[in-house]
Each structure stands twice: as structure tokens, then as C-alpha cells.
Image (cartoon, helix red, strand yellow):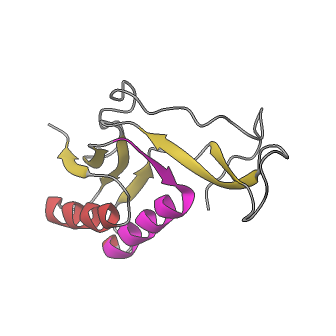
């Protein structure tokens, strides 16, 4: 699964996802893409699951680009741990996604195949998405 090799700070504050994306809003690599319509955290497992669903469907045809990366650490304290005692250990990594971000791109396949592959990927993600194409 995806995770950063090296981080400046091991544990990060939660933060808030406000507003719409200003970066990664257009297709840069492929002809078709999957764009987020809502803001949410997407875990490394969900990204990998979506990637596998797309790759299996196109079956050695086309090229897929993943435009997001899980670089935010999420910490969890053990169950039944009393208050205090500091912040919990890093549990997983997530990618904070703002509405309007392009998540995946695909090229080298027909429009119908790309649309079906993106739909299969969208089922694996916790946010609303839409299929987009280069004009």
C-alpha cells in the first residue's frame, strides 16, 4: 500500500477540509478521469482497492495515473486507554481530498471502457465522484 518513505513530522494534527480544490483540477496525463465532488479523507487501502478494480477491468490495456497520495498520518489510541498519556500511535495514512480534485486518469482505452473502469473505482471510494473527459 501507499505510504510516505520519510516524513518531517511523524504525527500530524487533524485539520479541516474547507472549500474547493485549487490544484489537480484538470486532466494532465490521460484523456479520461475521475473527479471528486465532495471532500473526504481517502485511505491508502481505498486508493489501492480502486486501482486494482480499474487495472483488472482494462486487462493490460491503457495506462492509469493515480493523482493522489496518502501522506497524512492518522493516529489511534488503544481501546480502553484512560485520558492523558499523549497522542496514540500512527495507525494508517490518508489523502485529504477536496471537492474538485482529479483522483485518477486513464488513457489508451475507449470511452466506454474508461467510463466502466472509473465506475468500478468509484464504488471503492468514500466520496461522490464524476467521470470527466478532455475537451
Estimate the x, y position of residue 135 in percent, counting from the top left: 14, 36
Residue 56, by quadrant, is bottom left
Asked if residue 45 lies in the magenta stretch, the reply is: yes
Residue located farthest toward the front when viewing the structure as drawn:
82
**Relative to 18, 110 lies left or right:** left
Residue 11 vs 81, above or below: the answer is above
**Relative to 30, 3 lies left or right:** right
Where's the N terminus, which quadrant? Answer: bottom right
Residue sitting at 61 percent across and 56 percent down? 2
Estimate the x, y position of residue 67 in percent, counting from the top left: 44, 44
Estimate the x, y position of residue 73 in percent, counting from the top left: 66, 46
Q: State the extent of the magenta-drawn residues as a range.
A: 39-57
Residue 92 vs 25, above or below: the answer is below
Task: Identify which residue, 76 or 103, lies in the foreground.
Answer: 76
Residue sitting at 23 percent across and 61 percent down? 114
Residue sitting at 38 percent across and 47 percent down? 103
Amino acid at each position: 500500500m501507499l505510504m510516505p518513505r520519510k516524513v518531517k513530522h511523524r504525527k500530524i494534527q487533524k485539520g479541516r477540509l474547507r472549500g474547493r480544490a485549487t490544484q489537480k483540477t484538470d486532466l494532465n496525463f490521460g484523456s479520461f478521469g475521475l473527479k471528486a465532488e465532495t471532500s473526504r479523507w481517502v485511505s491508502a487501502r481505498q486508493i489501492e482497492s480502486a486501482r486494482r478494480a480499474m487495472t483488472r477491468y482494462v486487462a493490460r490495456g491503457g495506462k492509469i495515473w493515480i493523482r493522489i497520495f496518502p501522506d497524512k498520518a492518522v493516529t489511534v489510541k488503544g481501546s480502553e486507554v484512560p485520558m492523558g498519556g499523549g497522542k496514540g500511535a500512527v495507525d494508517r495514512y490518508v489523502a485529504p481530498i477536496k471537492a474538485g480534485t482529479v483522483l485518477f486518469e486513464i488513457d489508451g482505452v475507449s470511452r466506454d471502457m474508461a467510463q466502466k473502469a472509473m465506475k468500478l473505482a468509484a464504488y471503492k471510494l468514500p466520496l461522490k465522484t464524476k467521470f470527466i473527459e478532455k475537451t
